[in-house]
Image (cartoon, grey):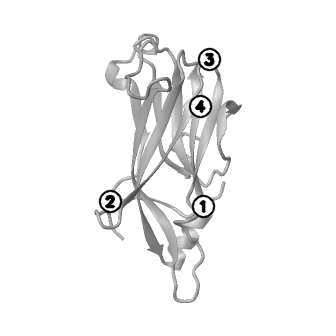
Amino acid sequence: MAYNIKDVFYLSTSATIASGTSAGGSAQLDLSAYIDPIARGRQKGTGLAVYKVHWGIQPASDDSEPIDDAEVGTFTYGLIAGLGIGDNATGVINAADDALQMTNSLLVSSGMFLGPKSQVANACTPANMFNQYVDPSTEVPYVIVRDNVVMLYQVGDQLTGAMTISCRLEVAQITLDQSTLNQLLRTQTV
């Protein structure tokens, strides 16, 4: 399979980040229909290649409106392969310190949101409000061989208004030889 119009399709998920709440939350995307990590006879195992991840953040009260310029909240966000923690409301979980860092081998995509009003305190420019710092590529996709991927977020400064965070993944099912499959299964252990 390759990155082309014939093989690539979209998957998406979203979550609401509550205002005035600390800690984190999650939304789990079930991938079991697209992945079969067991090779049987001549049939090879299949994984899900993630080529691109597109992120969106809008006010939860009206997803068509831009973010209010008085927003002071900040949070980090990302997709983690095989985390398997399900859907959790804001404040229910507290992400591990390294969960959204580039050193996490299960991290598919991640970034940081800084509300417009927080930028003064954080010495940022408007271009820095939405910082994407890890992403797969069309040349080297992230291949998931676990049955889920979790969108995880961790609030830094509480939001003044609830936000909807959403992501769309450009993906394709791919066949994997046994050695590649074994390597991916070893590295995608939580």
Amino acid at circle 2: Glu
Sequence-wise, which precedes: disc 4 or disc 2? 2
Q: Secondary structure at mark 4?
A: strand
Q: What residue is shown with label 3?
A: 20
Q: What residue is shown with label 1?
A: 147
Whether label 2 touches label 1, CB < 8 Å = no
Sequence-wise, which precedes: disc 2 or disc 3? 3
Q: Residue at the bottom extreme?
A: 41
Q: Residues within 10 Å of mark 3 (few under 14, many from 20)?
A: some
Near-viewer residue (26 or 66): 66
Q: What residue is shown with label 2?
A: 139
Sequence-wise, which precedes: disc 2 or disc 1? 2
Q: Secondary structure at mark 2?
A: loop
Q: CA distance from mark 4 to mark 1?
A: 23 Å
Q: CA distance from mark 2 to mark 1?
A: 23 Å
Compared with residue 113, is residue 181 higher up or lower down, i.e. above or below? below
Q: Is residue 142 left or right of residue 138?
A: right
Question: In which quadrant will I find the C terminus?
Answer: bottom right
Mark 4 or mark 2, whichever is nearer to me: 4
Amino acid at circle 1: Asp
Q: Residues within 10 Å of mark 4 (few under 14, many from 20)?
A: many
Q: Secondary structure at mark 1?
A: loop
Amino acid at circle 3: Gly
Q: Residue at the left extreme?
A: 5
Mark 3 or mark 4, whichever is nearer to me: 3
Whether label 3 touches label 1, CB < 8 Å = no
Amino acid at circle 4: Gln
